[in-house]
Image (cartoon, grey):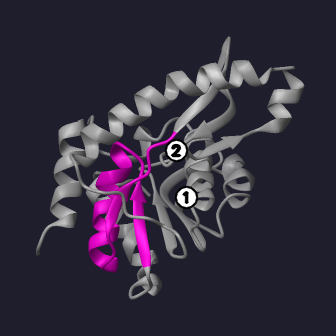
Amino acid sequence: MRFIDRTDAGRRLAARLLGLRGKDGVVYGLPRGGVVVGYEIAHLLAMPLDVVVVRKLGVPGEPELAMGAIGEDDTVVVNTEVLRARDLSEETLWQVQARERVELERRLVRLRAGRPAVPPSGRLAVVVDDGVATGATAVAACRVVRERGAARVVLAVPVAPLQCRRDLDSVADDVICLVERRRFRSVGASYADFGEVGDETVAELLAKASGPE
């Protein structure tokens, strides 16, 4: 299966999620491409759309290895196994967290443009991205909405490597993935059009989703 673009992927995912229509839920798109996919899902499921902005807390010198992640509302998820394995101090964790918090807040201000966050507490949270490469960001996002009180977490992505399935299943109650590839090249390889999505587009979609029909 190959998707025309992110809109096409969102509509195909939404068709798989129609059983959730009418539930008290929120669709959370990961900026930037996940918001384009999530917009279609939110529209067809009649749910509000918001962003879930997470920042991975990379190990100093090994930025791809996450020792945790942060989200808004001072949410912090810590991978204690990585901290112990790398003998990292709380001070090191705090320093990285402080730096990433600045970037997270900057992105939230730019993308939400003054609109309040849509809380997941006690609700269904549908976390959406335009694809999974390593799984780190999707895992962090699911953990963040769970920490913020989501009653149920559904991760919905168009494409992911088959080897990521265990990690994704560990953080979501349900994982909906249209294409799982054993031989995975990149997320973009599953799209005919995988053009860059700007912050302006994300902000426009969030505004459109929150406005009157």
Say which amino acid is labelled 1: Val
Residue 53 horizontal side relative to residue 204, left or right:
right
Q: Is residue 46 magenta?
A: yes
Q: Are marks 1 and 2 in contact (CB under 8 Å)?
A: yes
Q: Secondary structure at mark 2?
A: loop
Query: How many residues crowd around disc 1 within 10 Å: few (fewer than 14), some, or many (20 or more)?
Result: many
In the picture as drawn, the residue positioned furthest to the top comes out as 61
Residue 119 horizontal side relative to residue 91, left or right:
left
Label ID, residue 145: 1
The magenta segment is 25-54
The x, y position of residue 56, in whole percent, is 58, 33
Q: Nearer the viewer, residue 162 or 54?
A: 54
Q: CA distance from mark 1 to mark 2?
A: 9 Å
Q: Nearer the viewer, residue 103 or 43?
A: 103
In the picture as drawn, the residue positioned furthest to the left comes out as 213
Q: At 70% across and 60% down in the image, what residue appears? A: 169
Q: Nearer the viewer, residue 135 or 71?
A: 71
Q: Is residue 34 magenta?
A: yes
Label ID, residue 71: 2
Residue 15, image quadrant? bottom left
